[in-house]
């Protein structure tokens, strides 16, 4: 009965899939913990069958549990978040009170022996765990636990952001998101880019849209002052006058002592009293001027009294700042949160989202397009290689075509056409009876329906559309020789539409100053940006990829709120 004796903690094994041992029966000791990740058992090519006979400790949450054999034993489906598959765990009633283990959501740590399931059992599992000791249990009240066995809608799951990571769909999305982030850093590192952390708090508006969250302490400071003024009212004019009288009296006293040629000590003591009286007068006068409400100058809010001494905002992009490093270190990128105070409730908008923004020095628009295409392909290949099991879950539950879409993008050269050519194709489609909700004419910003029509219907592959009208693009994009378009490009993909937006930057200071004036942006906040053009200007290009849009594209999910761990949108900022 040696198999029924709990193994010592220092002999419990963790399985490694990083070497040829993945196809053997060898198990590797854990480096940081005494538990074995379920992925390292079930993720093996043999489904874990080659590990039969090995003693391991696993931890995780019970997805489903059921007593059998009239309560003689129970089967638990346990998942620890390392992979979409659950490990089947068999617990005998002689080992533990089964009623505490079977509720969905229960957290368990168990020691046991991996065994092949009985032949003819009909289970898909290649291996199961026979428990010899229940080490720890985090119990659940089945009556109040909000994540039941039955499938909840994604919208309902958003009510439980703190628990939804336990579901199959959200945990798979989290692993896919992680893989895309690692792929991002790996791609740019392999290509020689430096990772630069740009500020979240900024005083410049990259997009010129004005839809920015303001960062200020004026409101809290004002509220605190108003409470303090109620509890301790400001001095009256009479109080101020009384303080002035004291100063006058103390001044006269000093003068009298000096005239009488009093001792030095007496004069110094009197001067000290005078200084105290003056300080008290200054403080009294200052408090008398305190008034409820925000501080103002000439009818406008006085931001010189704010925390940063000027207006500040949450950034909508790290691009302008990362350009400063591109113009000194060559190829760089930033990857961080960005914010947009747009009161939009669509399935494609968030108030807080993540952007990947590389900047290539000495690069033109074609170089920019080449980099963007290579980056997107790299991420698609990475997912297919690293997280195929999670992609299978997404294909099964949400979008049957998501794996094929990744394969298409990973292996197909992107199409390229100018904005003008794209408009012509759309106009021809309209002439033949195609109906769009948004009108098609030269000068419009392509809508998602236009972008998806081009990628899904006309070309049936990813597209890069370039040379957009200057009127719909930002001031920093390089003006083309025709004077009407700028060297901008968008990468369009099936399912999502625009995935990347980028451009060659305007390196000519006279042209960029004209563009600022045209758009009506003040020059002063961008003087530092103009310095990059004044001192050693260089041709450079870059783009931004909306990270959540990439996750949407990969997974086939419909709502962007389901592909970010903690979505922020109008009316909601939970946790």
Image: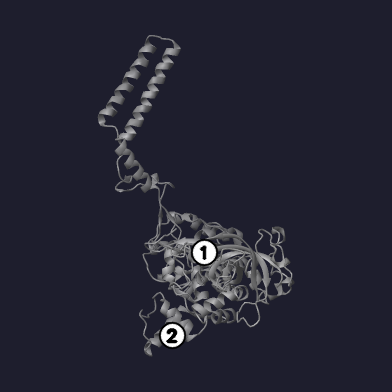
Query: Which quarter of the picture shows residue 448?
Result: bottom left
Residue 287 makes an appearance in the image: yes
- Tell me the SS state at disc 1: loop
The percent coordinates of residue 366 (x first, y second) are 56, 74
Mark-to-mark CA distance, 2 and 1: 32 Å
Residue 504 makes an appearance in the image: no
The percent coordinates of residue 509 (x first, y second) are 49, 61
State whether residue 260 is above or below residue 203: above
Q: Residue at x 58, y 80 (%)?
A: 407
The percent coordinates of residue 529 (x first, y second) are 49, 57
State whether residue 314 is above or below residue 44: above
Q: Which residue is mark 2?
A: 425
Q: Which residue is mark 1?
A: 507
Residue 342: assigned label: none
Colour option used: one colour
Q: Residue at x 37, y 89 (%)?
A: 433
Q: Residue at x 42, y 81 (%)?
A: 423
- Quarter placement of the C terminus: bottom left
The crowding category of the residue bearing disc 1, from other C-alpha atoms within 10 Å (few below 14, some 14 to 19, many at least 20), is many
State whether residue 263 is above or below residue 500: above
Report if the CB atoms under discs 2 and 1 are less than 8 Å apart.
no
Query: Which quarter of the picture shows residue 33?
Result: bottom right
The percent coordinates of residue 400 (x first, y second) are 51, 82
Q: Pick whichever of labels 2 and 1 is earlier in the sequence.
A: 2
Name the residue nearer the viewer: 284 or 442.
284
- Tell me the SS state at disc 2: helix
Query: Which quarter of the picture shows residue 187?
Result: bottom right
């Amino acid at each position: 009965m040696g198999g029924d004796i709990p193994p010592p903690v220092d002999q419990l094994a963790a399985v490694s899939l990083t070497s040829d041992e993945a196809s053997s029966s060898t198990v590797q000791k854990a480096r940081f913990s005494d538990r074995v990740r379920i992925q390292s058992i079930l993720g093996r090519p043999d489904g874990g069958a080659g590990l039969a006979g090995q003693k391991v400790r696993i931890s995780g949450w019970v997805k489903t549990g059921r007593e059998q054999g009239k309560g003689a034993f129970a089967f638990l489906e346990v998942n620890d978040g390392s992979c979409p598959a659950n490990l089947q765990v068999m617990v005998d009633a002689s080992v533990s009170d089964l009623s505490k283990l079977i509720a969905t959501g229960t957290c368990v740590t168990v020691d046991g022996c991996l065994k092949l399931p009985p032949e003819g059992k009909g289970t898909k599992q290649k291996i199961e765990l026979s428990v010899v000791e229940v080490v720890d249990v985090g119990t659940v009240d089945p009556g109040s636990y909000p994540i039941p066995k039955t499938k909840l809608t994604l919208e309902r799951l958003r009510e439980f952001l703190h628990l939804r990571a336990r579901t199959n769909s959200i945990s798979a999305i989290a692993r896919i998101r992680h893989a895309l982030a690692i792929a991002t850093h790996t791609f740019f590192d392999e290509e020689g880019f430096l990772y630069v952390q740009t500020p979240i708090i900024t005083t410049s508006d990259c997009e010129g849209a004005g839809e920015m969250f303001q960062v200020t302490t004026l409101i809290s400071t004002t509220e605190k002052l108003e409470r303090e003024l109620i509890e301790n009212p400001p001095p009256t004019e009479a109080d101020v006058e009384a303080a002035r009288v004291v100063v006058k009296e103390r001044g006269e006293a000093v003068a009298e002592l000096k005239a009488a040629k009093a001792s030095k000590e007496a004069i110094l003591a009197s001067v000290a009293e005078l200084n105290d009286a003056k300080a008290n007068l200054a403080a009294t006068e200052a408090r008398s001027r305190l008034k409820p409400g925000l501080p103002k100058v000439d009818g406008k809010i006085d931001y010189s009294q704010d925390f940063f001494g000027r207006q500040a905002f949450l950034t909508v992009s790290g691009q302008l700042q990362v350009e400063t490093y591109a113009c000194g270190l060559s190829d760089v990128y930033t990857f961080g949160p960005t914010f947009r105070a747009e009161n939009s409730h669509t399935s494609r908008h968030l108030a807080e989202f993540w952007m990947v923004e590389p900047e290539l020095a000495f690069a033109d628009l074609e170089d920019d397009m080449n980099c963007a295409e290579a980056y997107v392909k790299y991420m698609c290949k990475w997912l297919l290689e690293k997280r195929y099991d999670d992609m299978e879950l997404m294909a099964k539950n949400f979008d049957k075509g998501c794996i094929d879409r990744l394969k298409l993008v990973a292996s197909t050269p992107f199409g390229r056409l100018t904005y003008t050519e794209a408009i012509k194709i759309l106009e021809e489609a309209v002439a033949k009876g195609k109906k769009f909700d948004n009108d098609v004419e030269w000068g419009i910003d392509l809508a998602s329906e236009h972008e998806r029509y081009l990628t899904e219907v006309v070309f049936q592959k990813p597209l890069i559309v370039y040379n957009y009208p200057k009127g719909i693009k930002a001031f920093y994009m390089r003006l083309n020789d025709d004077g009407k378009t700028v060297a901008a490009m968008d990468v369009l993909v099936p399912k999502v539409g625009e995935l990347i937006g980028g451009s060659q930057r305007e390196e000519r200071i006279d042209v960029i100053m004209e563009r600022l004036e045209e758009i009506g942006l003040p020059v002063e906040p961008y003087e530092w940006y103009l310095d990059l053009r004044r001192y050693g200007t260089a041709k450079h290009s870059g783009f931004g990829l909306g990270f959540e849009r990439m996750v949407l594209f990969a997974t086939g999910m419909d709502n962007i709120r389901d592909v970010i761990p903690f979505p922020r949108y109008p009316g909601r900022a939970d946790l």
